[in-house]
Amino acid sequence: MTRSEPYHHANLRQTLLDAAVTLIGEVGPRAFTLREVARRAGVSHNAPYRHFMSKDELLAEVAAEGFDRLTASMRKSMARATSPRKQLQECGCGYVAFALRWPQHFFVMFDLPQALHGQEKHQAAGQNAFAVLQECIAAAQQAGDLPAGDLLPLAWMAWSFVHGIAKLAISGNLPLNARSTIEFTRSASQTIFGGMKAGSSGYGIR
Amino acid sequence: MTRSEPYHHANLRQTLLDAAVTLIGEVGPRAFTLREVARRAGVSHNAPYRHFMSKDELLAEVAAEGFDRLTASMRKSMARATSPRKQLQECGCGYVAFALRWPQHFFVMFDLPQALHGQEKHQAAGQNAFAVLQECIAAAQQAGDLPAGDLLPLAWMAWSFVHGIAKLAISGNLPLNARSTIEFTRSASQTIFGGMKAGSSGYGIR
DNA sequence: AACCTCATGTTGCCACTGTCAACATTCCGG
DNA sequence: CCGGAATGTTGACAGTGGCAACATGAGGTT
């Protein structure tokens, strides 16, 4: 046994997380299995329990990491925009692009049982991502591209919109390929933006 | 009366479907179990396999039934609207209201593995629901409330929007109760509608 | 009437899963 | 150098989806 792998894995926790992300990307969250994660990490089926209380806690951490990547994707897309308005637009495109590229991961982030949503990391990472969107809105407001006032309803609108596109596209309900979906997001964002800029009271029933 | 399948268990197939809908509503799709469905139908754990090829096929049919109910919910909400524009608005509210009332069922309808999305019934029922939305858009176009032209991009926009609200609200990402969520949907729809009416550059091009 | 057929329902089994308990190994602070 | 605390392993258990073989009984044919 002197030649075999060390009894204590160097950094098993992160190894497991990485394996989990990969596995979910391969087989989806439904076929995702704790035991298979352990197998891929070259470790017994119970080793993960020394690092995560349960399968769901592992998933919650995977989700948290997903939110970080989502944030990065949005920031990266925004980078190539100049005006606050275009930044908001590209922020949305970054959101959708992430969802299209890692649909399974996206699924874990948003469609986990509510139990998981209480997890600290998960919640914090999620709010970080949402904060990016809020920044965009705020910037657009300050630039006069959006009406001043309560920021949250505008943010919810924008978020709902890109989230809806992402979910429908992933589930195959939008007959568009990835490229067209992004293009659609961009142009539709413009439409939405026009409505938000005009304000909602114009044609009011209320 | 004229039913012609009364064998051991009179009309087991529908009994199983009903039990499945109930069970999913109670425990969610993750904890949902074929064996428990059979138990509740008072039947052995393998009886369902005489009516459904697999657990997933059962779920696909549950989803199809959900689409029918969704369609009904939209139509019901629309009934109290007069103008095409209000109809579209209320159609969206009906969509969100359904999702809020039966979140688990809604989940099954949209967040099933793609494999299921090929099922006939599922697809047909889904398209029926989408058709309601399209009718609304078309009516609004004819009434001059929306710019004439390609209908689909407008429909996708509206759908994505309400779908996003529904999913985010269900997953607890919108800090609003059900009532406020519907109100938000209504007012935000107006904003979106303004943008679509103004007709931004771009979405009709392709 | 008797008979046969086949859809429907049952029992038993399999591999697999998440999780618990008990045990083994290794690391680190006294 | 030692002993407790991490960390990893083995073994077990109940529960799952699905397969195969068997049982039952409804309906048509004779």
Image (spheres, coloured by chain):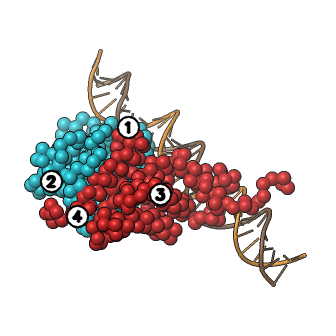
Chain colours: A red, B cyan, C brown, D orange
Q: CA distance from mark 1 to mark 4?
A: 41 Å
Residue assigned mark 4 = A199
Q: Which residue is mark 3?
A: A79
* Quarter where residue B126 is shown: top left
Report whether residue A26 is seen: yes
Cβ atoms at labels 3 and 1 below 8 Å apart: no
- The chain containing the residue under callout 1 comes to B
Tag 1: amino acid? Gly
Residue at the (31%, 63%) spot, across then down: A145
SS for callout 1 = helix
Distance from the alpha carbon under mark 3 to that under mark 4 = 27 Å
Residue ID at (46%, 52%): A98
Badge 1 and badge 2 in a common chain:
yes
User: Residue beneath label 2, please?
Assistant: B85
Q: Nearer the viewer, mark 3 or mark 4?
A: 3
Name the quarter where the C terminus of chain A is drawn. bottom left
Say left or right for A6 vs B81: right
> Mark 3 belongs to which amino acid?
Ala
Q: Is residue B43 visible?
A: no
What residue type is disc 4 on?
Gly
Q: CA distance from mark 3 to mark 1?
A: 39 Å
Q: Are marks 1 and 4 on the same chain?
A: no
Label 2 – label 4 distance at C-alpha: 17 Å
Task: Give the residue at mark 1.
Answer: B118
